[in-house]
Structures are given as structure tokens and as C-alpha cells.
Image (spheres, rainbow, N blue to C red):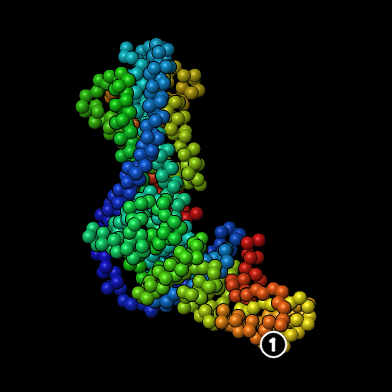
Amino acid sequence: MTALTIAAQDSTTMLGRELKHTLRFPLLLIGSILAPVVFLLLFVYILGGPIGGGLGDAARGAPYVDFLVPGILMMTVAAGSGTTAITVCTDMTGGIIDRFRTMAITRGAVLTGHVGGSVLRTLVTTAVITGVALLAGFRPRASVVDWFAVTGLVAAFSFALAWLSVALGLVAKTVAGANSATLPIQFLLPFLSSAFVPAASMPAGVRWFTAHQPFTPVVECLRALLTGAPAGHTGYLALAWCAAIALAGYLWARAAFRRGTR
Amino acid sequence: MCGMNALTKHATRIAVSANGLRKAYGEKVVLDGVDLSIGEGEVFALLGPNGAGKTTTVQILSTLIPPDAGTTSVLGHDLRGEAGAVRAVIGVTGQFSAVDNWLTGEENLLLMGRLLHLPAAERRARAAWLLERFDLVEAARRTPATYSGGMKRRLDIAMTLMGRPRLIFLDEPTAGLDPRSRNTMWQLIRDLVAEGVTILLTTQYLEEADQLAGRIAVLDRGRIVAEGTPDELKRRIPGAHIRLRFADAASLDAAAAALPEGTREDEELVLRVPNEGGIRSLRDVLARLGDGVAVEDLSIHTPDLDDVFFALTGHPSKEESQ
């Protein structure tokens, strides 16, 4: 067996372990479904009226729910980072990681397993959220190709945030700390993006940040794909951000993992 | 590809050799020049109090952390360049439970089998055999969260054994176990030894090292202060004795006359009588003392880690924690 097939085999084993964890503790999934559902219902049924009325051109004449759902989808991807950081930190603070480190296993297979598990969990949670959104009146105008693109972008964004969350889980001293470290990803960045309202409607300082932070091109691209509008350059920008975050997260995670036992 | 390891590798006589191991965390020197040489098939105990450097030694020898200085080889492989080869032949059971708490006992073993790249049939057979051997069949389909401390420790060792390691590190294998589980663990360790596995075990208990190890090294503040067989070490330690305290000097005199081998401590009205034979020798001492002498207090003293330390280093083991 070559080193590469062994690496693939070890990563698959670790992925299988992650999936088993998720099946045994569905709370890992439910936790990252609950918050986006609450926000979806809150914004559609309670806050959505006045916000939707004030959207003007940004809504392209569609109801607010169609503007909102791409943002909720992105938020669902972000919500998975909490679970990922928690599971990584649980591994690192328990004894099992020392066992893995003293076995002849591909280094980092345990991390790849976490990333793979995170992406698969996110694909499940975003599918569930899409279902809830349809029930809440979301009417996408995406073609089959668009849906593939949406799935691809969700997976890419999830992959990027997963590496970042793995790094956060590795450097956190406690499981609670790991969760707190992902709160900006889960809530702050989605709210300071054009997920809920267009960047143009925000105060000047925030508007600049919103226009230039990575979550905005992701949500803009999802929105364009789901409403059947042209995505323009947002797709490339979103993918570039995903690649940059994934690379930074990966390098950070690798360094933190190598730093050894605590 | 597996299983060939044992055949292709030539037999080495030395399982572990370490020279001048040093490790410091900032200002705190944890290992200050440790030398070890452990033969294949030997059970070697590192005895010392908390903070002596036992766990650090195990972490270095099991490839978890690099030493600051010193050379080490494990089963013929240099730790620095051949960590992967070392990992393939060792097994580690640490102080802290190294099991996956979200998987069942059986799944934990099968996970090890997959990571060791064992074929599916062998994986299942070996897991089933280990569950049987470690008395975990009933618990196989439950998660370790429902296990007792002893069961968790048994699963931990079973996981270590999935890979048929030639050298096993047991870092305080009985810490926190009740006496019954501790005895079970001792028996398990003896069985492993009978199969020819080399074992490096760390412990805080002289009794445990005495029971299990063929050779003991006493570790104190990152240095090995004594090394030898249990008997050699015990000869250097003040022996077990019975301490008898009397109400008055007359009783002490009478007792000292009846038990001439005893040592008097007049101001405390105490007589210390050597007691190497356990209950039999206690009975003998009491019989020779007779009914006429009134003993106010009797205590039995067996040498423990504190005595070892006091005898070997001149300071008690507890001092370390201050």
C-alpha cells in the first residue's frame, strides 16, 4: 500500500468514526439546525414585514422570504462550525488523541475525518433548512444546474469553515471555550453580511466591512443562484474566499496539531 | 502487510535504551538526565511520586513529545528518525482513559483494528477474543460512559492489545481503581508478561512495583536515584515492623526483655519489632509477649514509597508537591 492509499484509508476510518458519533448523538445536528430555523421563522413571520417593505430594488419584486433564505442557508453552514470545534476539542482534551498519536496512523487523519464529518453534517442540515424554508413560503427560481452550483458552494464554504473550526477547536483549552470561539462565525459575520438586509442600507462604517467580508459574496452568490439572477463575479469571489479560509484554517490547524500534547 | 513486521525484524535484545534524557518546560526541569536500559520480555517499573517525571518519560519513549536532549531507541528504532516504526510496535495505556466515549466497547476495538489496517475477519475475531478475555462481553454494546473505572481500564488495555504490541507502556495502570479492580489489573499484566511482552510501567506504589516488576528504577525530581530488583531495593529500606506502645516504663522493660530483637524508644514508651513475616510473625510476637504485659497501642508498619524515598534521597516524597 502506498502512503497515499493508507492516508485515504485512515481518513475514511476517522470519517466513519465522526459519522457514528453524529448518528449516536443527533444533538450534534439538531444544535446547528435549531438556530437557523428560529431566525428563519423570526424574520419571515415577525420582523420580515417592515424589512421586506424597506428592501426596495434589492428584493427584485419578490417577497422578503426569497431574499432571506440564502442568508439563512449561509447561517446554517456557519452554525456547523460550533459543532465541529466542540467535537475537535472534546477529542483533544480526552485521552483518545494520545492513543492516536502513539499509533502508526497517518498524521492528521483525525482532523481530515472531522472536516469530512463537518461537511456531510452541513449538507444534511442545509437540506433540512431548505425544506423548512419551502414550507415557510420560499419559492426558488433555480434551475437544476443552479441547484448543483448551490450545493457545491455550500460544500465549499462548509469545507473552509470546517478547517477554521478545527483550528479553533485545537487551540481552545476547554470545550466551552471552543464553542465561544466560533460565535463570531456563527452570528456576528452572518449579521454583518448582506444576509438579512442589503449592505447599502447599513451605516457607512459597517457598510464597508459588510461589502468586503467573505460572507457577503457567499450569500450574494447563493441568492443569485436561488433566484435565477446572474451571479456575476460574486461566484469567483466567494470561491476565492473559500479557498483562502480553507488554506489558512488548514495551516493553522496543522501547526496547532503539531504543537503536540498539552 | 501487517503481521510481517514481527517476522522481518531481527530480534533485538534491548527493548528500550535511553541515554541522558532531558526535558524542561520553561524554567521547570522535568527530566534531568535519565538513563534507562530495558531488555526484551522484561517488566520494568518506574517508581516515583507525582511530578517525578514518570509520565514525561513515557511520553518521550512513546513518541508523544520529543526530548530536549538525549538519545533513545525503542526495539532497535531511533525515536528521532523512525517514530513511525516505533509506533508500529508499541502500545500505550495512559493515566487518562484513552477510549472513545461515544462509541461502544466493541466499536472502540474495531476502530483500533481499522486504524491498524487489519483485515475485516481478523479485526472481528480479535475484538471478540479481547472482549472475552477482558470480561467485557456483556458490556460490548454499551458506551464506556456506563462502565466502572476498572472496566474502562480493561477496555483501554484491550484497545492497546488489538495491535499485538511488543512493548507496552502502562502509565499508572491502577491509579484510581478499587482494590478488587486493581488485583484484576495485576493479573492481566502478569498474563501479558507470560506471553513475552515487554512492559514499562509507572507507579506511585512500592507494592505494585514489587508485585509486578522484575526491575525497578526510582525516579525523583527527574533523576533516577536507585535501580535494581525489588529485593535489592527493599534491602536498602528500613524493614516492616510492629510498633508497640506501652502505658509505663515497667511494661516497656518487660516487653523489651521478651522481644530482644526490638528497638526501644524510651521517651515515647515504644518498642519497634521487625515483622517480615506478616500475620504469622505478628502472632509469634504477641505470643512471646504473653498476657502479662499491657499494650496500649499496636500498629503495623510496612515500607511504602515514603520510606523508599526517605532511605534513598533523604527527603520525603511529599515534599515534591510544594
- Residue B76 found in image quarter: bottom left
Q: Nearer the viewer, residue B88 or A246?
A: B88
Q: Residue furthest front?
A: B291
Q: Name the residue rendered at 28%, 24% in the picture.
A: A225
The answer to whether residue A95 shows anywhere in this view is: yes
Q: Position of residue A136 (x, y in %)?
A: 32, 20
Residue count near mark 1 (Cα–Cα under 10 Å), binned few <14, some 14–19, many ≥20: some
Q: Is residue B235 above or below residue B108?
A: below
Q: Nearer the viewer, residue B157 or B9?
A: B157
Q: Name the residue rendered at 36%, 62% in the picture.
A: B135
Q: Name the residue rendered at 30%, 35% in the picture.
A: A123
- Residue A47 found in image quarter: top left
Q: Position of residue A59 (x, y in %)?
A: 35, 15
Q: Amino acid at mark 1?
A: Ala
Q: Nearer the viewer, residue A167 or B164?
A: B164
Q: Residue furthest left?
A: A144
Q: Name the residue rendered at 69%, 87% in the picture.
A: B258
- Find disc 1 in the rendering and name its residue: B258
- Indicate the quadrant containing the N terminus of chain B: top left, top right, bottom left or bottom right: bottom left
Q: Position of residue A197 (x, y in %)?
A: 41, 19
Give the chain of mark 1: B
B254 vs A97, left or right, is right
B32 vs A127, left or right, is right
The answer to whether residue B44 shows anywhere in this view is: no
Mark 1, secondary structure of its residue: helix
